[in-house]
Structure formats: C-alpha cells, structure tokens
Image (cartoon, grey):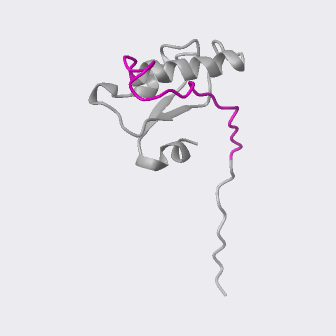
C-alpha cells in the first residue's frame, strides 16, 4: 500500500447565467452583409440587456465561431468591447469545428 494520497485541488463553482442567440434566417438573406462580430455583438448585448449586466465585470467571456475569417482575430474580445459589459472582463475565442459551443461552455 502506498503512502501517497492524491489530493485534487479544490474546485471552483462556475455559473452559466444564460444564453442568447440571434434569430434563425436563411443563408444570404437578412444577415448577408453582417460580419461575425456584428452577429456576436448583437447576441451578447441581448444577453447583457436580459440579465441587466451593464457595466459588470464577468469572470470571463468565451465565444467561438465554427469558421472565422482572418479579420476576426480576437473575435470575442473585440465583440465584448462593443457592448456595455465592463471592458475589464477577460474574453477569449474558441474554434473547434463541431465542438465550439461545448468547448466554450
């Protein structure tokens, strides 16, 4: 029998406060001229409005897109800065084919 005992680090509680999305639309219709950032800002600002998070600093903000353009460097951070959340909220991108949403959560 070994003297070694495994003591995992204490876990931190995490909360997913809610979700938001833009309405579904057919390809090349109402969103045809909107960028990934435009769409993410609309979804994120809707979440901020719904939960009255204006000016709040969150623990972190993770977002992703299955396919991003090279101009979408740091999409989550740039999008967050266009909302009324505190600019001190850390933000990062996730891009993982079909697993983007699951990885972000």
**Percent x, y for residue 91?**
49, 29
The residue range painted magenta reads 12-35
For image coordinates 48% across by 16% down, the residue present is 81
How many numbered marks are there?
0
Occupied quadrant, residue 5? bottom right
Above or below, 43 against 14 in this view is above
Above or below, 17 against 84 in this view is below
Above or below, 90 against 64 in this view is above
**Percent x, y for residue 82?**
48, 13
Instruction: Please name the predominant secondary structure of the magenta segment in the image.
Output: loop
Q: Is residue 73 left or right of residue 103?
A: left
Taking the magenta stretch, the answer to whether it contains residue 28 is yes
Occupied quadrant, residue 49? top right
**Percent x, y for residue 77?**
45, 24
Position of the C terminus by quadrant: top right
Q: Most extreme residue toward the bottom, as rendered? A: 1
For image coordinates 70% across by 32% down, the residue present is 17
Q: Most extreme residue toward the left, as rendered? A: 70
Residue 78: tell me if it is visible: no
For image coordinates 52% across by 16% down, the residue present is 87
Q: Nearer the viewer, residue 51 or 8?
A: 51
Residue 14: tell me if it is visible: yes
Taking the magenta stretch, the answer to whether it contains residue 15 is yes
Q: Nearer the viewer, residue 10 or 94?
A: 94
For image coordinates 64% across by 69% down, the residue present is 6
Q: Nearer the viewer, residue 54 or 27?
A: 27
Position of the N terminus by quadrant: bottom right
Q: Nearer the viewer, residue 9 or 27?
A: 27
Q: Is residue 42 left or right of residue 31?
A: right
**Percent x, y for residue 50?**
70, 19
């Amino acid at each position: 029998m070994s003297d070694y005992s495994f003591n995992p680090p204490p876990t931190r509680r995490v909360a997913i406060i809610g979700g938001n999305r833009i309405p579904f639309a057919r390809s090349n219709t109402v969103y045809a001229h909107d960028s990934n950032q435009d769409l993410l800002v609309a979804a994120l600002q809707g979440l901020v409005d719904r939960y009255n998070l204006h000016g709040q600093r969150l623990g972190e903000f993770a977002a992703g897109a299955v396919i991003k353009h090279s101009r979408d460097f740091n999409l989550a951070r740039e999008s967050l800065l266009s909302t009324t959340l505190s600019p001190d909220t850390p933000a990062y991108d996730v891009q993982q084919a079909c697993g983007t949403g699951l990885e972000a959560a």
